[in-house]
């Protein structure tokens, strides 16, 4: 009997998956209430479900403009889902328990480790406290800076609310905004040349997307790069390459289209924001639908990569793409193992990176085929952009979201859910019981 009870216990991955499911359900019910909309007529449940999924999975895809459609109650529900979904309900729940002097057992510590995606269980309680404290500090600082822009235009109280809302949305890489008061669905296009707004958002997005374990390493070792963990070195290096390389690439691709007729400073801000926000914040300061074909491809690539492990960002993660490139270079150069920063990567890390890449790519392309089969009138480029945005929890769109049917919306909801929970984690949850460790005879085949 005891053995059977042990077998029925949910794994940490199953707890996280179930927790997000319940959070989405509760959020969808609240958002479907008449009081949640400005019209007082309520929202169709499928649209409330879509919005709750997008907020909980910190994506930012919307079927209705957040400012125009949702009342203050609805906006606060969305903001709560963003904050809990971004940090993770386990991390927030444990922090509340610690405030009430509750004891945290080994099982809970393991759940924190899974939620924060840390390398070891030692020190997870200290890290949990640090995550909450630093998050609130970053969000309050970012909110105060953004309020300096909004307060003179909207008044002090409304300016503070808008500043805090966008700071939380940016830090959690959520992509929801209230700038519909300027023009619905405009995001930050009206602030394209405002350095205070754009650079504050870039800072918040970057801090939220590098990962909690990297924060801890940076705090402990300050500017001593040689003392950082291998994980931190790879995250920082890959992130720097993507930001710098992405800024230059976006400027080169968009200099004659969306960045044309701008001053050099505005072009720099536009290119920088276009390089940072697809990974996976979901804001935009230039018209996404007006991007050149090259700009759209680059944006889809960045949405697919996303942020770093153990962060508020989605995507396959910077470390995954780094490992795949390092493995490719190692094979081409015929080196002994895959090496980086004087260390050799374990084979299981390489295998995991390959599986994550293939699962996410398969989900995105499979979803695109299903949506195009359901709605053949939609442009393939728009659908591909939408599915890569959903699986990467990026939230950027060319405007096709509002044209999706109920079936297509459910497909996008599934992608957002997998993107936030983790496609590999979701696959493991579905896989259930592990097979016994049987090794079959080796076989040969030709590839490439």
Image (tube, helix red, strand yellow):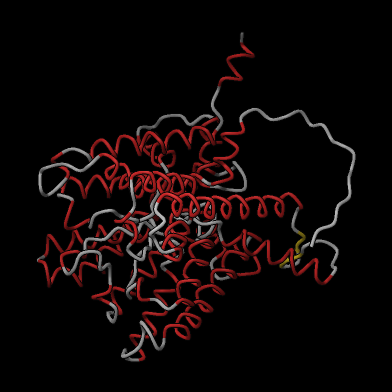
List x then y, in percent, for residue 312. Answer: 44, 54
List x then y, in percent, for residue 361. Answer: 57, 55
Q: Please report the residue visible at 20 percent of the width from the left and 61 percent of the height from the top.
A: 162
Q: Along the horizontal axis of the image, is 91 left or right of 77?
A: right
Q: Nearer the viewer, residue 58 or 234?
A: 58
Q: Please report the residue visible at 68 percent of the width from the left and 66 percent of the height from the top.
A: 325
Q: Along the horizontal axis of the image, is 42 left or right of 130?
A: left
Q: Please report the residue visible at 22 percent of the width from the left and 39 percent of the height from the top.
A: 32
Instruction: Classify 239 as above or below 254.
Output: above
Q: Please report the residue visible at 27 percent of the width from the left and 79 percent of the height from the top.
A: 194
Looking at the rendering, which quadrant does residue 167 occupy?
A: bottom left
Q: Nearer the viewer, residue 176 or 49?
A: 49
Q: Nearer the viewer, residue 92 or 320?
A: 320
Q: Along the horizontal axis of the image, is 181 left or right of 229?
A: left
Q: Quadrant of the C terminus?
A: bottom right
Q: Nearer the viewer, residue 155 or 13?
A: 13
Looking at the rendering, which quadrant does residue 138 occupy?
A: bottom left
Q: Residue furthest top?
A: 1
List x then y, in percent, for residue 142. Answer: 30, 65
Q: Along the horizontal axis of the image, is 366 left or right of 35?
A: right
Instruction: Classify 39 as above or below 345.
Output: above
Looking at the rendering, which quadrant does residue 25 occupy?
A: top left
Camera sees residue 352: yes
| Count of number-bearing discs | 0
Instruction: Classify 51 as above or below 157.
Output: above
List x then y, in percent, for residue 378. Answer: 39, 60
Q: Quadrant of the N terminus?
A: top right
Camera sees residue 130: no
């Amino acid at each position: 009997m005891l053995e059977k009870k042990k077998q029925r216990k949910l794994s940490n991955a199953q707890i996280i998956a179930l927790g997000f499911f319940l959070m989405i359900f509760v959020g969808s019910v609240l958002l479907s209430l008449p009081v949640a909309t400005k019209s007082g007529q309520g929202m169709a449940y499928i649209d409330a479900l879509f919005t709750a999924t997008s907020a909980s999975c910190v994506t930012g895809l919307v079927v209705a403009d957040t400012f125009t459609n949702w009342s203050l109650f609805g906006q606060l529900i969305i903001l709560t889902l963003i904050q809990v979904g971004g940090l993770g309900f386990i991390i927030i729940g444990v922090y509340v328990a610690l405030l009430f002097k509750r004891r945290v057992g080994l099982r809970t510590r393991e759940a924190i480790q899974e939620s924060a995606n840390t390398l070891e269980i030692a020190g997870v309680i200290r890290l949990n406290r640090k995550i909450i404290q630093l998050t609130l500090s970053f969000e309050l600082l970012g909110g105060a800076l953004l309020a300096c822009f909004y307060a003179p235009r909207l008044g002090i109280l409304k300016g503070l609310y808008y500043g805090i809302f966008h700071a939380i949305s940016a830090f959690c890489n959520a992509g929801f905004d209230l700038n519909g008061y300027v023009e619905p669905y405009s995001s930050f296009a009206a602030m394209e040349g405002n350095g205070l707004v754009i650079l504050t958002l870039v800072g918040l997005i970057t801090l939220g997307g590098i990962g909690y374990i990297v924060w801890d390493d940076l705090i402990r070792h300050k500017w001593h790069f040689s003392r950082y963990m291998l994980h931190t070195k790879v995250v920082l290096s890959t992130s720097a390459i993507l930001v710098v390389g992405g800024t230059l690439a976006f400027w080169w691709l968009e200099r004659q289209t969306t960045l044309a007729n701008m001053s050099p400073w505005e072009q720099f801000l536009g290119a920088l924001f276009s390089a940072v926000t697809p990974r996976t914040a979901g804001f935009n300061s230039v018209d996404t639908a007006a991007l050149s074909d090259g700009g759209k491809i680059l944006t889809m690539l960045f949405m697919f990569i996303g942020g770093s492990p153990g962060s508020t960002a989605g995507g396959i993660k910077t470390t995954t793409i780094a490992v795949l490139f390092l493995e490719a270079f190692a094979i081409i150069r015929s080196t002994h193992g895959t090496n980086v920063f004087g260390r050799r990567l374990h084979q299981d890390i390489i295998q995991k990176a390959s599986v994550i890449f293939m699962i996410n790519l398969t989900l995105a392309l499979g979803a695109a085929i299903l949506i195009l089969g359901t709605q053949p009138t939609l442009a393939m480029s728009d659908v591909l952009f939408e599915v890569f945005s959903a699986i990467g929890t990026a939230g950027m769109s060319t405007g096709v979201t509002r044209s999706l049917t109920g079936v297509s919306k459910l497909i996008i909801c599934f992608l957002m859910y997998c993107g936030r929970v983790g496609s590999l984690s979701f696959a493991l949850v579905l896989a259930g019981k592990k097979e016994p460790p049987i090794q079959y005879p080796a076989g040969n085949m030709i590839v490439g």
